Amino acid sequence: MPLISIKALPFDPQIEIDSALKSLSEKIAIQCQIDREHIMITWEWLSYEHYVHHGAVVDKQQQGSHPVLIELIAPNYYSHDNIKFLMELIATDISSNLPINRNNIFISYTPAYSEGIYDQGHVVNWEDN
């Protein structure tokens, strides 16, 4: 774990994001010393009629509005500093590898709790480790 879910409007011109996601996974693995098998990243394209920001609907990803939306789910035992570091790492890497202004990224953090995650065929209890 962590689980990172990214949502954005389509880019113009359209771009491939797989190398950016692989880069992000690699950076998290190295910088946070987490095995890649525990890092999950998803990307979802938003349909333009499904995203309103500042009262406006646009059809392509903007640099100054309609922020890229990122949800970070990570264990609740991560310190506040760990979460801040991870958020900064995500914003820096995504904005370095994709045409996204770092100031147009919105990241929220949701803590995951022991016995609140089902993975690899069982409910995970990290308090027993």
Image (spheres, rainbow, N blue to C red):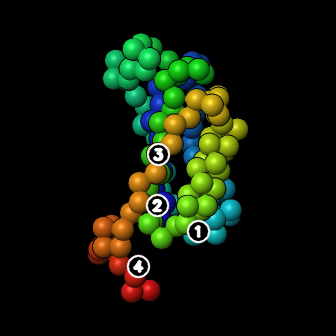
Q: Amino acid at mark 3?
A: Ser
Q: Which residue is mark 1?
A: 34
User: In the picture, which quadrant includes the C terminus?
Assistant: bottom left
Q: CA distance from mark 2 to mark 4?
A: 12 Å
Foreground disc of the pair 1, 4: 4
Q: Amino acid at mark 2?
A: Ala
Q: Which residue is mark 2?
A: 74
Q: Say whether residue 10 is left or right of residue 64.
A: left
Q: Which residue is mark 3?
A: 108
Q: Say whether residue 129 is left or right of residue 50.
A: right
Q: 81 or 70, which lies in front? A: 81
Q: Which residue is mark 4?
A: 126
Foreground disc of the pair 1, 3: 3
Q: Residue at x 59, y 62 (%)?
A: 82
Q: 129 or 119, which lies in front? A: 129
Q: CA distance from mark 1 to mark 3?
A: 20 Å
Q: Say whether residue 35 is left or right of residue 56.
A: right
Q: For numbered disc 3, what is the local secondary structure? A: strand
